[in-house]
Amino acid sequence: MRSVAPHYRESATLDALQELVDVAAQVPHEVARQAGLSVSELHSLRHLMGTPMGPVELARALGVTSAASSGVVDRLAARGHVERRPHPDDGRRTEVVITDSGRAEVFTRLAPMFSGLAEIDSSLSDRERAVVERYLRGATAAMRALM
């Protein structure tokens, strides 16, 4: 490793960061499994929590074809987690809107994680929080450099 990254030294912080990255990659698969959803369906709900999206927009966000996105929306609509509605500004278009059922599915599954994260965050002093934030933002920037 040091031949390609001379400053790299194994450390407890890098081990912990790698563990976090590994667990974070597994979370969507496990949450989707528990909810009886595909990972694409779960990611769709996550995207729609922020704002309604058109089917093509959702396909882009998921990195799938429009046809694949349409199938995801069909399955979520059949479960009552999303609705297709006319676009408010362009009656020729539709948008996909998350329902209360979809929000409840996401919040219920993720609530234990959010509670645990809030608890650990609240245990930090402002000074500790600043150090952790600097480390995590730096790690994020290092990973984004690959994209």
Image: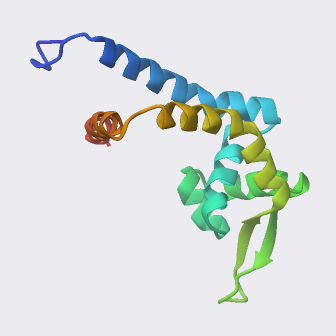
In depth, the one of 59 and 15 nearer the eye is 15
Residue 38: x and y in percent read 73, 38
Q: Is residue 137 above or below residue 97?
A: above
> Does residue 129 appear in the picture of this structure?
yes
The correct choice, above or below, for 70 with respect to 147 in the image is below
Residue under the image location 28 percent in, 33 percent down: 135
Tell me which corner region of the image, top left, top right, bottom left or bottom right, holds residue 47: bottom right
Residue 129 at x, y = what percent? 36, 38
Nearer-the-camera pick, 126 or 46: 126
Quadrant where the image shows the C terminus: top left
Q: Residue at x 53, y 29 (%)?
A: 25
In this picture, is 120 found above or below 95?
Answer: above
Left or right: 88, with 121 as reference point: right
Quadrant showing the N terminus: top left
Percent of width and height locating residue 111: 70, 39
Left or right: 112 with respect to 100?
left
Which quadrant of the view contains residue 33? top right
User: Who's the residue at 80% across and 50% down the image?
Assistant: 104
The residue under the point 51% across, 30% down is 120
Q: Is residue 72 above or below residue 51?
A: above
81 relative to 135 in the view: left or right: right
Q: Is residue 2 found left or right of 138 in the rendered image?
A: left
**Residue 71 visible within the image:** no
Residue 83 appears at what percent x and percent y?
Answer: 82, 66
112 or 22: nearer the viewer = 112
The scheme the figure's colours follow is: rainbow
